[in-house]
Image (cartoon, rainbow, N blue to C red):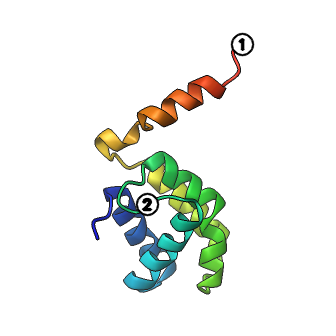
């Protein structure tokens, strides 16, 4: 199964920040993405940021990571420093709905 560069980077970062083995880190990330309705092959940095903030802490705790909240804060900061080229931009449909649902001032 092909995974996005964002998924690959995040899986390695989880491994580096938690001491989880590669398969456990990637599996934990897959569970969090699945709960968010996202696909590892197409997840964007914007989507991954939301997963790291809102869903991943719960799954890291289930995997026995002591400071899951702190790990996720560090992961979010590190993710924001990465350049994933075209994937940095929200998808066209997402961008449309973000504009449509944002109140005008």
Q: Would you name the residue on which mark 2 appears?
A: 39
Q: Which residue is drawn at 45% across and 37% down?
A: 90
Residue displayed at 42% across by 49% down: 44
Label of residue 86 in the image: none
Image point (60%, 82%), residue name = 65
SS under mark 1: loop
Q: What element carries label 2?
A: loop
Per the image, the residue denoted by label 1 is: 105
Q: Is residue 4 above or below residue 102?
A: below
Percent x, y for residue 3?
Answer: 32, 64
Residue at figure coordinates x 42%, y 32% from the top left: 92
**89 lies left or right of 33:** left
Question: Relative to residue 78, is residue 61 depicted above or below?
Answer: below
Which tag, 2 or 1, sits closer to the chain's start?
Answer: 2
The quarter of the image holding the C terminus is top right
Classify mark 2: residues with Cα within 10 Å, few (<14), some (14-19) or many (20+). Answer: some
Q: Quadrant of the N terminus?
A: bottom left
Q: Please state the horizontal and vertical placement of residue 45, each as a whole percent of the image.
A: 44, 49
Q: How far apart are marks 2 and 1 (CA)?
A: 34 Å
């Amino acid at each position: 199964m092909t995974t996005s560069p964002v998924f690959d980077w995040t899986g390695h970062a989880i491994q580096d920040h938690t001491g989880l083995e590669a398969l456990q880190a990637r599996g934990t990330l897959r569970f969090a993405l699945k709960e968010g309705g996202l696909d590892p092959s197409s997840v964007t940095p914007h989507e991954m940021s939301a997963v790291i903030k809102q869903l991943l802490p719960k799954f890291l705790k289930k995997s026995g990571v002591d400071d899951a909240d702190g790990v996720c804060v560090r992961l979010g900061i590190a993710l924001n420093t990465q350049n994933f080229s075209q994937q940095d931009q929200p998808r066209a449909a997402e961008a449309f709905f973000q504009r449509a649902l944002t109140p005008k001032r």
